[in-house]
Amino acid sequence: MPTLLIKNARCVATFDHHDPQQARELVNASIFIQGNRIAFVGPTAGLPPEALAADEVIDARQHLVTPGLVNTHHHMYQSLTKAIPSTQNAELFGWLQGLYPIWAGLTPEMVRVSTQVAMAELMLSGCTTSSDHLYIYPNGVRLDDSIEAAQQIGMRFVASRGSMSVGQSQGGLPPDSVVEREDFILKDTQRLIEQYHDASHGAMLNIAAAPCSPFSVSRELMRESALLARSFKGQGVRLHTHLAENDHDIAYSREKFNCTPAEYAQDLGWLGADVWHAHCVKLDDAGISLFAASRTGVAHCPCSNMRLASGIAPIRRMLNVGVPVGLGVDGCASNDAAHMVNEARQALLLARVGRAMQPPEVRTLPNGDRRTFFGCDLGPTEMTARDVLGMATRGGAQVLGRDHDIGHIAVGMCADLALFDLGTLGFAGGAVHDPVGALLLCASPQADYTVIDGRVVVRKGQLTTLDLGPVVERHNALAIQLAMGV
Ligand code: ZN
């Protein structure tokens, strides 16, 4: 069994407690990995004797070690359509309508190559597990293409079988040419679960059932998808979709279904600990209560929400009542990056802006005095760096139903780790005071090392599993081909 020793780390932020403020941060600590699991974490002096003969030793005296970051929402094929000029300044529905005709030209090779490019970006930013939501299947594209790409690059993967079935002629948003038949969608989803879904501890691949959104699939498909996923009892097959992303999304729900998105989700059986919804920017207080009571998860995508001017998701209100929240970079055409540390930084900053925009609140102080607080007084306490890193690691693992084996650093957990070099320029003057806070406040660094399932997939800032140069070159050629095809 291969062994790996991460020796004398300046700081190991374990996130080994559900409250990030109470999790252990170890100084001058070591981590010993046997196979794909963590066998030891603690003071270097306490290392087991076999650790000294490890196959590979990483000198981490200058590093911050965190759990591998977990990305809970993405559309990796969109990597081919970053920064398309005609959709740079559109909101969600206009942006989608501008891109659907381009995406109609996707091919299986395009999906494979763009998935590798998006995953490379994620892994180089310290991300070790990602979900992907592929919901468009023209020209023979299959979810198998994404899965093949993930297996080649070595990323832990939650492949979500997305779908669209209600085209424009039926009152939906996408053109009819890119929707699929519902009976085929369900059959293909079942095939993928049976062929690929791994329910075991340390699984590298899970499959989720993921109709795209209320405005592109029918009620029946939502209901049937939930029944299908839940028919695999005890297998951890999860449900994923987009919900309450912006005001137009709410208006569509009101007009078509005569209810809020959260009420719609409840009616469809789409609340529960096996469900996670992307965005939820416009989830109202009643919706947040429904999510909390049912332990329904949320993928928070701050960059995309800013890029498309969707709004500021009420993340603090969700966390306060116990809604599981993870971070997601969202698709590459609305971010347009896949950098998990930067995503966490934006989540931190956006929460504070959101707080400052709230109306004044009258609060009773411990001594009984009543005082008016303006949002800007409370802003900086709305979200701390540790709160967000907790979301980006442990929170994401919970949202993906994987908190038992990934998302924090402890003996027996999967060896998914990110190491950041505190000697680099971006950390100068910050890491000496607080390396964990500095990770988000000072810079959005690349990972110096990323370890997935015990395997070093980024070493000294370079991907080890793939020769990235030719992949990027091919990706750019395919991006031009796709855009020219319209
Ligand atoms: Zn999305």
Image (spheres, grey):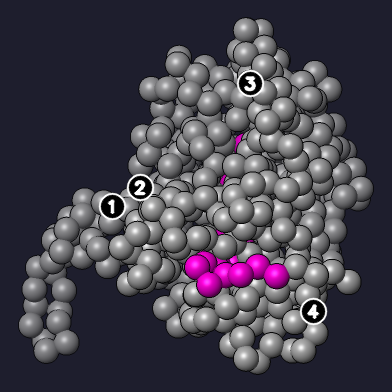
Check if mark 4's residue and mark 3's residue have beta carbons within 8 Å.
Answer: no
Using the image, determine if residue 166 lies above or below residue 56: above
The boundaries of the magenta stretch are 57-75
Q: Image point 45% across, 83% down: which residue?
A: 22
Q: Image point 55% across, 54% down: which residue?
A: 447
Q: Earlier in the sequence, mark 1 or mark 2?
A: 2
Q: Earlier in the sequence, mark 4 or mark 2?
A: 4
Look at mark 4 in the image and give the residue it sits on: 53
Question: Which mark's residue is nearer the viewer, 4 or 3?
Answer: 4
> Residue 117 at x, y = what percent?
66, 35
For residue 11: magenta?
no
Q: Residues within 10 Å of mark 3 (few under 14, many from 20)?
A: some
Q: Earlier in the sequence, mark 4 or mark 1?
A: 4
Kind of residue sitting beneath label 1: Gly
Q: Which mark is residue 354?
A: 1
Q: Image point 52% across, 50% down: which residue?
A: 446
Kind of residue sitting beneath label 2: Ile
Check if mark 1's residue and mark 2's residue have beta carbons within 8 Å.
Answer: yes
